[in-house]
Image (cartoon, rainbow, N blue to C red):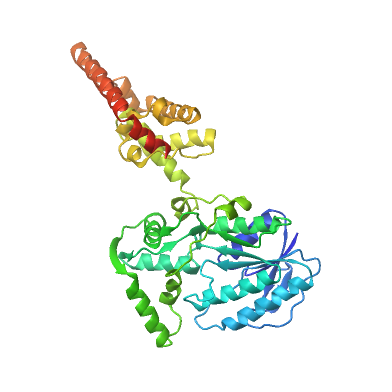
């Protein structure tokens, strides 16, 4: 399909453009000034600050409106952006072209920010003319841009994370997942649904969101400081009353009164499976490798009773990667921190037969890798250790006693272990 894309160089737009090209679509980008064009790719002249009549390129199939001026300048005329978007919608209607507008969870006729009210106005115009609207939650991941970039900068520069009272809620969505959802809507034919809300189904507190930025994105520790929300609202009213130019605080104030979105059915309709917040915060967009490294360390430590080398853990990762695409089993944190408790896992409390078979295979792999190492030789063959028969008998007796103890504990704590393994 031939797709006109506005805002292709923006935070979300560049991911959408890349995915469209990967799926074989022809992308026509929008330019405010054609003289600044550096290559020979097709383009379409469109300027949000100049609401003129527009004519779409011939044979256009979809218009994808992602552009906004709100985050590029503290001084911008939102009325011009609404009018320019209206002209783009009219051009799509005139050419009988599918129109898709990227909006925000902050969109509302009485939103706290001009940005939210502007998004609402464009939404209404798009829906009134048969267009489609994608209302996205708090976008995160990738480069620190947009509101996500503002929040990351604040966490990086501040030694504290605000503990909002009462909690402020956000519904995150990774930028790559959002791009996939938008492209899926581009390719979806004959959809009667016009408004799609895309974000995690379960809201998280803004404090937890900031904590994840600190822990997984910045790898830093922060302390928590209680902050009453009504103080922030008072400051926001003062900013408005004094007609102070929009600031970082103004942008964050958009999160004060977000409407919770019901996204479950929309995610299903677009065949979209969102990644976990912890995974998305990782620089690569996936925390799977780190999870697999921790799993390998835990299983090997459980088997050998000594901390394995980095080389041995990487061997485990390579073995698992060759068999199951490198996905970790996501063992409960208790077993990762204290691998001794892995002895409590059994077929009866792990639940699914396939899951038990996979766990057994991974534990066996960790055992074989340990046996082939120096640590394993010392552990299983008593390499470099002098032994006598009396000491060996006492060790055998101790091992048998310990085994009976673990079997007893396994029976006692089976319901608890089963809950943690299958939740």
> Farthest residue toward the right?
58
Is the C terminus in the top left, top right, bottom left or bottom right quadrant? top left
User: What residue is drawn where x is 57% and y is 81%?
Assistant: 78
Residue 415 percent across, percent down from the top left: 35, 32
Residue 48 percent across, percent down from the top left: 63, 79
> Residue 69, can we see it?
no
User: What residue is drawn where x is 70% and y is 75%?
Assistant: 88
Displayed quadrant of residue 421 = top left
User: What residue is drawn where x is 60% and y is 50%?
Assistant: 268
Q: Nearer the viewer, residue 216 or 63?
A: 63
Is the N terminus in the top left, top right, bottom left or bottom right quadrant? bottom right
Residue 390 in the image: above or below residue 363: above
Residue 283 in the image: above or below residue 14: above
Q: Is residue 137 left or right of residue 420?
A: right
Q: Is residue 231 left or right of residue 72?
A: left
> Residue 412, can we see it?
yes
User: What residue is drawn where x is 43% and y is 71%?
Assistant: 252
> Farthest residue toward the left?
390
Q: Is residue 28 left or right of residue 152?
A: right
Residue 382 percent across, percent down from the top left: 28, 20
Displayed quadrant of residue 403 = top left
> Farthest residue toward the bottom?
242
Residue 307 percent across, percent down from the top left: 31, 35
């Amino acid at each position: 399909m031939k797709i006109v894309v506005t805002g292709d160089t923006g935070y979300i737009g560049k991911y959408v453009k890349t995915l469209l090209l990967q799926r074989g679509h022809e992308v026509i980008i929008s330019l405010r000034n054609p003289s600044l064009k550096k290559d020979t790719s097709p383009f379409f002249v469109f300027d949000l600050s100049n609401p003129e009549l527009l004519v779409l390129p011939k044979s256009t199939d979809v218009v994808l409106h992602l552009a906004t001026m709100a985050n590029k300048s503290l001084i911008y005329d939102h009325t011009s952006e609404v009018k320019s978007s209206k002209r783009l919608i009219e051009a799509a209607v005139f050419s009988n072209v599918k129109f898709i507008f990227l909006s925000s969870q902050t969109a509302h006729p009485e939103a706290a920010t001009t940005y939210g009210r502007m998004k609402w106005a464009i939404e209404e115009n798009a829906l009134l003319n048969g267009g489609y609207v994608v209302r996205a939650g708090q976008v995160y991941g990738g480069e620190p841009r947009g509101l996500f970039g503002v929040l990351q900068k604040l966490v990086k520069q501040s030694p504290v994370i605000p503990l909002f009272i009462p909690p402020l809620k956000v519904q995150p969505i990774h930028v790559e997942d959002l791009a996939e959802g938008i492209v899926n809507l581009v390719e979806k034919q004959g959809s009667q649904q016009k408004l799609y809300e895309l974000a995690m189904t379960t809201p998280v507190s803004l404090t937890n969101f900031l904590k994840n930025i600190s822990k997984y994105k910045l790898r830093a520790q922060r302390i928590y400081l209680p902050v009453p929300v009504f103080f922030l609202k008072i400051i926001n009213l003062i900013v408005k009353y004094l007609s102070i130019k929009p600031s970082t605080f103004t942008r964050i104030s958009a999160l004060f009164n977000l409407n919770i979105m019901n996204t479950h059915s929309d995610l299903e309709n677009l065949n979209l499976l969102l990644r976990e917040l912890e995974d998305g915060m990782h620089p690569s967009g996936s925390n799977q490798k780190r999870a697999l490294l921790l799993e390998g360390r835990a299983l090997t430590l459980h088997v050998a009773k000594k901390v394995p080398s980095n080389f041995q853990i990487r061997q485990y990762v390579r073995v698992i990667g060759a068999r199951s695409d490198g996905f970790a089993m996501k063992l409960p944190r208790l077993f990762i921190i204290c691998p001794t408790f892995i002895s409590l896992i059994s077929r009866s409390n792990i639940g699914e037969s396939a899951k038990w078979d996979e766990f057994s295979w991974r534990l066996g792999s960790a055992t074989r890798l340990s046996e082939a190492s120096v640590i394993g030789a010392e552990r299983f063959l008593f390499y470099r250790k002098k032994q006598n028969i009396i000491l060996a008998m006492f060790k055998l007796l101790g091992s048998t006693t310990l085994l009976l103890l673990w079997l007893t504990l396994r029976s006692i704590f089976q319901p608890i272990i089963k809950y943690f393994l299958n939740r």
